[in-house]
Image (tube, coloured by chain):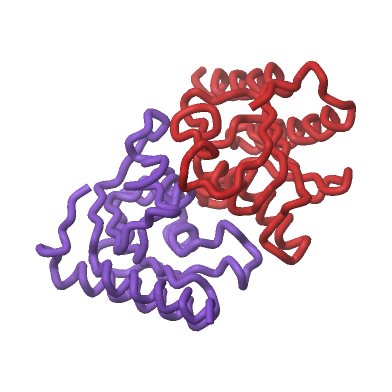
Chain colours: A purple, B red
Amino acid sequence: MSNVAAQMSNKDQTFMDAALAEAAAAASRGEVPVGAVIVSGGEIIARAGNRTIELHDPTAHAEVLAIRATCTELGHDRLEDCDLYVTLEPCAMCATAISFARLRRLYFGAGDEKMGGVEHGPRIYAQPTCHHAPDVYGGISERESARLLRTFFKERRT
Amino acid sequence: MSNVAAQMSNKDQTFMDAALAEAAAAASRGEVPVGAVIVSGGEIIARAGNRTIELHDPTAHAEVLAIRATCTELGHDRLEDCDLYVTLEPCAMCATAISFARLRRLYFGAGDEKMGGVEHGPRIYAQPTCHHAPDVYGGISERESARLLRTFFKERRT
């Protein structure tokens, strides 16, 4: 993993901003505020925020929804030329889905000590059972990502 | 994990046979032969086989499809009273989805050294990032499960 927050391009920041907008939209629906976009050829192919409550689907994390939407859009299940931007470190489920989808690069915001599967817990991409690992860049817009989550859970507790 | 193949009930065998039938049906569609059923109150709520190729969806493993179908059927995303029978050791993605869905018990067939996430690789349920682990029973009908997979890949190679 490389922390590339300092040397991010304007385009990378634009894509992470789009993911943050999806996270904010998720919060406004009462969902845990995590958002993701998938990019190919400099264009956003799919945008998604968490919808686990709305869809009654524990697998409806932002990353999984974005992967499924991109695969539908492109008509195949391997996204070798695509990059994923997500506001929070993916969990083990999403990290593995990213591997199966053969995504090229993973950019994420805040790390997730409690549920993360890339830099925490199972560290999916370091396992012998992982047969494709994306290039991983963490710490992008992590303050804004973490702020969205903190505000969301604080409001839930009061 | 407990190997309970020797003391399985007739009902458990019936459910695993139903999962094996889903695996065989997946093979006939050209999909990797893995099948799953979810059971509640002694009844099968959902049946699924792999459909990753058909759906252009790398997340469309039998377990994920069965979980999503059960959640839709029951109208919520927590399946505390449900058990999952699957012919192959779940991968890290499916093992994590099983945890998120709060499934009570996981019965699986053959172990999977290459891709498994329960007894191999990330051992998802032993991680500090795992906040619900089902009771796990492996080795059920493992010969038949492995035979289906072996036959499928042998036919693909010739």
Residue placed at 74% from the left, 30% from the top? B20
Q: Is residue A97 visible?
A: yes
Quadrant (top left, top right, bottom left, bottom right) of the N terminus of chain B: top right
Residue B71 x/y as whole percent:
71, 59
Q: Nearer the viewer, residue A141 or B37?
A: A141
Compared across the picture, whether B127 is left or right of B42 comes to left
x and y percentages locating residue B35 in the rendered image: 68, 37
> Observer-nearest residue: A123 or B158?
A123
Position of B41 relative to B120 (above/below): below
In the depicted structure, whether residue B56 falls above or below residue B21: below
Tell me the residue at 36%/62% (across/down). Answer: A88
Closest to the observer, B86 or B41: B41
In the rendered image, residue A66, in percent from the top left (x then y), is placed at: 44, 63
As drawn, A39 above or below B36: below
Residue B48 falls left or right of residue B93: right
Residue pictured at 26% horizontal, 50% vertical:
A136
Identity of the residue drawn at 72% across and 36% down? B85
Q: Position of residue A46 (x, y in %)?
A: 40, 68
Q: Is residue A84 left or right of residue A32?
A: left
Q: Is residue B28 visible?
A: no
| Residue B139 falls in image quadrant | top right
Residue reaching furthest left?
Answer: A7
Quick check: A2 above or below B113? below
Q: What is the tally of numbered marks visible in this picture?
A: 0
